[in-house]
Structure formats: C-alpha cells, structure tokens
Amino acid sequence: MMKRLAPVDLSETFNTSVIVVDRNDHLLRAFTTANGRWRLPLSQKDVAPHYYDLLLNFEDKSFYEHKGVVPKAFLRAAWQWGRNGRIISGGSTLTMQVARLIALHNSQMNGQKSSRQRKSLWTKFAQIKLAFRLEKHLSKQQIMELYLQLAPFGGNLEGVRAASLAYFGKEPKSLSIAEAATLVAIPQSPESRRPDRHPSRAKKARNRVLQRAYINGVISKGDYLYALRQKMISKRLAFPMIAPHLSEQVVASNKKDKIVKTTLQRHLQEKLETLARSHAHRLGKGLSAAILVVNHQTGEVISHVGAADYFDHDRFGPIDMTGRIRSPGSTIKPFIYGMGFDAGLAHPETLIEDAPVRYGLYAPENFDGKFHGTVTLRKALQSSLNIPAVKLLASIKPARFSARFRYAGLHKSIPNNLAIALGGVGFSLFDLTKSYLHIANPESAVELHTLKSKGRTTNEKVFKHRPLLSRQAAFYVSHILRGATPPKNAKPGELAYKTGTSYGYRDGWAIGFDGKYLVAVWIGRPDGGATTNLTGIGAAGPLLFDTFQHIGEKRIPFRPAPSGIITASGNDLPPPLRYFDKKKRRMAANSKDAVIDRVQIAFPPKGAEFYMSNQKRNKFQIALKASGGKLPLTWLVDGRLISSKAFERESAFYPGEKGFMEFSVIDALGKTDRVQIRVR
C-alpha cells in the first residue's frame, strides 16, 4: 500500500517571500508573498541548535524514529475523543503538523475558507495519510524545514525566520534559549499567544516549554532559571529595510529568483545610510544625498545609497537619486583634459591663458568671476577653472568629445556644444561612476554590476573594453586630481577626487578614488530646486571623504605610472607642449632652444595604445608632434613616407587599420627618433 502513495506536490507550499541579501548572504530586505504573508526561506542549519532540542522535547520526541505517526498517541487521542465527544489531545507528530499546515495552505490557495479547520477524526485521518506520503517521499530534514517555513506565529507571520526577525530583531541562528522556547510555544495557538498582543499568555506558554525541557534534562537548571527571568517582548519589529532602492530594482529585474544575492556589503551599507541621513539633515530642509561605492578592480557595487532617508517624503525619500539625470557641473572636466592629453594638445604642465575669451555669442566665465592669467593645466583642473576647460574642449571639438563617450559605450546623448565643459549635459550618478572607472582603472574591462550568483555576476553584460582614455592620459588626470585641495581635516594626496556644482546651486557632486575603491556622491534637492550656496566642495566633498573613512581599509596605493609618461615641466617640456596657445607654441617650437642635439617625438609616447571604432575607421587620426632637431622634418610609419608639411613640427596620420606600428622622424641633419604604438 505504501508504494502506491502519490508524491506530494510542494510547488505552491514553497511559495516563500522574495529576499535580497548581501554578498555574504546577510538579509537586506524581504518582500511579502502574493497573499501578503511573511514566509522567509530557511534551512535547518540556520537555526540555533537549542531550538530543535526544545521543539522535539515539547512536540515530538520520536521525530527521527517514527514513520509519520505514533500509534499509541493517536489511539489515546481517539479514545479521548470517543469519551468526551471532542478532541482533547491531538497525538500529532511534527510530520502530521506539517501535513495540516500544507492542507491549510492549499485550501487558502484554492480560495476555501481558512479561518479554522473543523477538528474531527476525518481530518486526522487525512493528516495521517498525508504524513505517510511526506515520510515516504521526503527526508526528515526536508520535513523539518517545511515546519520551519510554515509554522504559524500570528498575524501574517509564518515560519521561524519571519517570527525571529519580527519579534526579536535577529536571525534564528542567534536565538537565546528563552527566545527559542517562545517560538516553540506560539504555533500551538498563534493568535492567542502573540507576544505583541498577549505577552502574558506568551510568557506562560514559554515557561511551560522551559519547564518541560528542564524536567527532561534538555537544559540545565542555571539555563532554566535564567530563561525564566527574561522579559517577554511586547511589540512587533519592522523587517530589515537595508538598500531599499536597489532591492526594489533587483527584484523587479529578477522575478524568478526567490533569493537575490547582491554585491553589497551590509555592514558598510548600514553605516553609509546613517551617514547620508545625518549629512543631509545637517545641510538643510528638503535636501537628499546619494552615494555609490565601487570596487573599481572588479566593477562590484559594494554600497548603494539612493536617498538620505527612504521614509522621509519631505525629502522625496522613495526616489533613487543614483539614477536621476542632473547636471554634473565640473565633474565632466577631467575627461576634457584627458582627451586633450590623448590628442597631443597638451601636458599637465602646459601653460594656458586664463583670460577673457569669446566663441561667437558664448563668453565663458570662471566660477569666482575672476581671471587668473597664465596657469598650468594642472593648476587649472585642480582649481576647476572654467575658461581653460572651454578652450581645451574647443580644440578637441565637442563632436569628437561626445563621439568618444559613445564609442566607449558610456553616454549616447552628449550635445555638441561648448557648454558641456561647464556641466551643460545630463548625467546620473551611476553614469558618472561608470565614466570615472575609465580614469581609475583604464586597463581593466570591468562593468558595474550589483548581482552575484555562485561567485559570478548575473546581470553583467557582454562588455567589449573600449576605454575612454589611454593609460597615459588617465594617469595624468588621476595624478592631477590627487593634488586637489581636500576638505578641512582630511589628508591631502590620499585620494584623486573632483567636485562639481551645477548651475544655480542645484546639485553638489564629489567623486574620488584610490587604488581599489571609487566613491561617487551627490547632494541636492530631488525636485531640482536651488539651494543657497550649495557647492560640491562644501557639501559633497566632506561626505566623500567621510565615506572613505567608513570603508575602513587603509588607502590602497595608486597604480604606477605607465610607459610613455613625460615627467618634465617648464622649459624641459618638448617645445610643442610648453604652451597651449598656438602663437606661443609656434614661437617655442621655432626658437633657438628648440634645436637640441637629437630630434625627439613628443607625441605619441612610446607604447601608447589608441582605440579605433570600426565606424570611424576612415576618419580616425593620430596626432604627430616632434621637438628639437633642425627643420625640415620627415615622418615615416613602418618605413613608409607620411605626407606632412616639412617645416612644421606637427602632423597627423590616418592609420585605417589596427595593429602595431612604428613612427619615425628624421630632421635636416639626418638625426632620427622612433616610437612604437598600437592601434586597437
């Protein structure tokens, strides 16, 4: 007869809550089931061992020996029913209780009345039959885990994990003896023993569990007396709500997964949510804050703070500001400088005039309204001067700047105008973070991701590495940003960072990195309103440095300088790189001190790598610059003559194909220099 027992369909019974966990499986957020129940997934190993000791002692001492039913107990219950006309003792094993819970759950799923199942011998027989089926087709561990997930604890709480979190604010593995005894007692009469409504009844039931455990030698006298003295909780706690914005996003995009594992670190996430909340409250009413922390060596997002306070509707807390499009202010400038270095237009020590300039009707001004005269590009970027950035962008061409972002797969809608140098373009904090990965780690092919599965990312796109900047340009930019003046009480040189302020004081930005972590911060009003004197350096900068302090590790050293870096400055720079303005550059290139013993290729540097898209193959060019030697100059690539103007020190080459190639230059005296580069 036992062989004809049909398997048990548990597909609906295992309809547990969806939960989001961090990289170490710590709970971040849980969601109710479709019918509004809290029923969290749980395995037997995740519960304190003394819970099982108390449970089996009180409910089913022979659980691991019987086949679903204890005949003597059932016959006793039947005799009592016949004598009294009602069921006095159930004689139920844990397996029978699981059978009853499954039947109750299935009746609810089928729309039947679920207030109370009528107690009768017929329902007992049905439970016995299902108990036999469970014992035949499932292991004892599986049956126990079903009980752990389905046991009722009052209200919409089902399962030990949901009850442990709601009543004690902890995972079941950390339950004390008194707490474990409480969870053993409640399921016998879940509504009348709810600690949040009937704490005195819950305490009496708990003490009966403890007393029986002591009498049977399950717990010691000391543990028994100590547990009896523990107060009974009298309120229900809220479930964890950590990384609420990201949790909603990953659940929406992974509808089949019951457990969604993220790359976040719960401990850091909790600290940064508190930091963002206190920082925003300190700055003023209506302000919010968003923080992203990324391991730029792997692309893993380890903290995602979408708002200052998810529950603060005055600050639009439910809105995830990491994905909202805003003006990035001056945080866009490092990419302009980097592309200028890549194009051979300048070097960090190149001198540029911070003076009035006009492009048609557009006349940019500095943030402080002043002009600073002749400055190096290093100083111009560290001081976030506007005019030098606009000049550099004008030489690069806005169309080429935006095309470079599209080629790298970063941003598809950068306008082709000079206003982008001052933040005249829409970026989200997430967009900006992805872009800065190309400065912090230009050699790596990492893509930002927030999900993990068995050590691998599950939402990682196929990513063909197309860096925004070369290794040399990225090094120049990061080296400049390391010299930026930090906020008060912060050590200089530990971070490479840049701040930005959008037009009208609407947004404050700060983004920085060391050799491992990249942090991006936004401060502002989610409704886009202006805030008096809100700046990146004053509002977002301190939050950036505080975030790095909370990461807790010592600052990771920066990458060493790649080959091809020019470390000279002043008159030691190659003449074409001494001045940005064309007239001064031409004078320097043709001055007496420009003629040195040997002609040298100033650009491209040795070992440089260039990235050419297939769509731009015919238009892609490499700038060529030489210093020293005697004019006229002759340029060659792999021994083939390049068409160039002999009495100029600058030229250009259109490679057309990818691969390694060698450039050579020969001056009028026959002296030569050569460099090898690669086009990808």
Image (cartoon, rainbow, N blue to C red):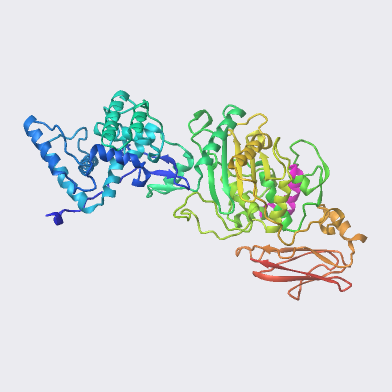
Relative image position of residue 29 (x, y in whole percent)? 43, 40
Q: Main secondary structure of the magenta part?
A: helix
Q: Magenta stretch: give its range.
A: 382-399
Which residue occupies the extreme right position in the image?
A: 592
Question: Foreground: 14 or 627?
Answer: 14
Question: Foreground: 109 or 80?
Answer: 80
Relative image position of residue 325 (x, y in whole percent)? 57, 42
Rendered residue at 74%/45% (across/down)? 483
**Residue 229 magenta-highlighted:** no
Does residue 569 appear left or right of residue 250 in this picture? right
In the image, residue 292 sits, relative to residue 113, either above or below, namely below
Rendered residue at 49%/29% (across/down)? 313
Rendered residue at 73%/71% (across/down)? 662
Question: Foreground: 48 or 671?
Answer: 48
- Quarter that holds the C terminus: bottom right
- Quarter that holds the N terminus: bottom left
Does residue 87 appear left or right of residue 616 in this picture? left
In the image, residue 211 sits, relative to residue 496, either above or below, namely above
Regarding residue 359, the answer to whether it shows in the image is no
Does residue 398 appear left or right of residue 31 in this picture? right
In the image, residue 676 sits, relative to residue 201, either above or below, namely below
Regarding residue 632, the answer to whether it shows in the image is yes
**Residue 398 magenta-highlighted:** yes
Rendered residue at 23%/45% (across/down)? 63
Question: Foreground: 446 or 663?
Answer: 446
Place residue 618 in its image quadrant.
bottom right
